[in-house]
Amino acid sequence: MATPAQTPRPRRREPGVRRDAMRNRLIESRLTPNAISLTGFALNVVAAALVWQELYIWGGIAFIVGSVCDTLDGRYSRMSGKGTQFGAFLDSTLDRIEEGIVLTAIAYVFAKDGNELAAAAVVLAVLASLMVSYTRARAEALGVECKVGIANRAVRVVILSAGIVFADLDLLAPAVYVLAGLGTITVLQRILHVRKELTRLAQPASDL
């Protein structure tokens, strides 16, 4: 008795193949790194407005999603080849503005509640954040790579996100204190790192 012919099963696509197909479609789309950067900026503005209204959980979610966009724009730029020098400049500039406007909203909440110490800590956190970025940019202009330090942007985002989301548990002020402290330490670490590297580079070749 003849056995009935079996219909061949369709082959399943491997996860890597599907991932590559999705990536190629994304690259071929009109999406640009600048669009991702601006989306992250808009979400951080929304986060600041929600924190201003003391809607902390929603503000924290908006801040987290906006910060994720900030990490994706650089990766997408390298992956797609759509990056430009202006795009890199815009990304770095928006990163500083985003952190500043969210912290400004937090400072307003502290000032309204009469928490002067926490409001002052926000000012220090903003200053430290700007200096962390400035020291790296200035070092790289001098030919020194400067990514050292315990509180890069990713660490600061995690600390601030936790503080905002759990603000109703009185964790916003402690998060700001930690942010200000770690940011200040990071600035000092980068200053010492650059001093060490420039001293090493200034030594005659015979001394090395």
Image (tube, rainbow, N blue to C red):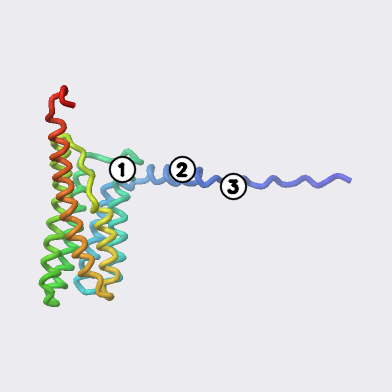
Q: Position of residue 4 (x, y in %)?
A: 80, 47
Q: Taking 44 as reference, is 16 left or right?
A: right
Residue position for label 2: 20
Residue position for label 1: 77
Sort mark 3 into few (<14), some (14-19) or many (20+) by Cα contacts within 10 Å. few
**Among numbered discs 1 and 3, the one appearing first in the sequence:** 3
Sort mark 2 into few (<14), some (14-19) or many (20+) by Cα contacts within 10 Å. few
Q: Taking 2 as reference, is 170 left or right?
A: left
Q: Secondary structure at mark 1?
A: helix
Q: Are marks 1 and 3 in contact (CB under 8 Å)?
A: no
Q: Secondary structure at mark 2?
A: helix
State the residue in front, 193 or 70. Answer: 193
- Quadrant holding the C terminus: top left
Q: Residue at x 52, y 47 (%)?
A: 15
Disc 1/disc 2 C-alpha distance (Å): 16 Å
Q: Position of residue 197 (x, y in %)?
A: 17, 36
Query: For the residue marked with disc 1, what is the amino acid?
Result: Ser
Query: For the residue marked with disc 2, what is the amino acid?
Result: Asp
Disc 3/disc 2 C-alpha distance (Å): 15 Å
Residue 82 sits above or below residue 102 on the image: above
Residue 57 sits above or below residue 5 on the image: below
Residue position for label 3: 12
Say which quarter of the image contains residue 42: bottom left
State the residue in front, 67 or 114. Answer: 114
Q: Are marks 3 and 2 in contact (CB under 8 Å)?
A: no
Q: Residue at x 19, y 65 (%)?
A: 177
Residue 103 sits above or below residue 152 on the image: below
Q: Taking 112 as reference, is 22 left or right?
A: right
**Among numbered discs 3 and 2, the one appearing first in the sequence:** 3
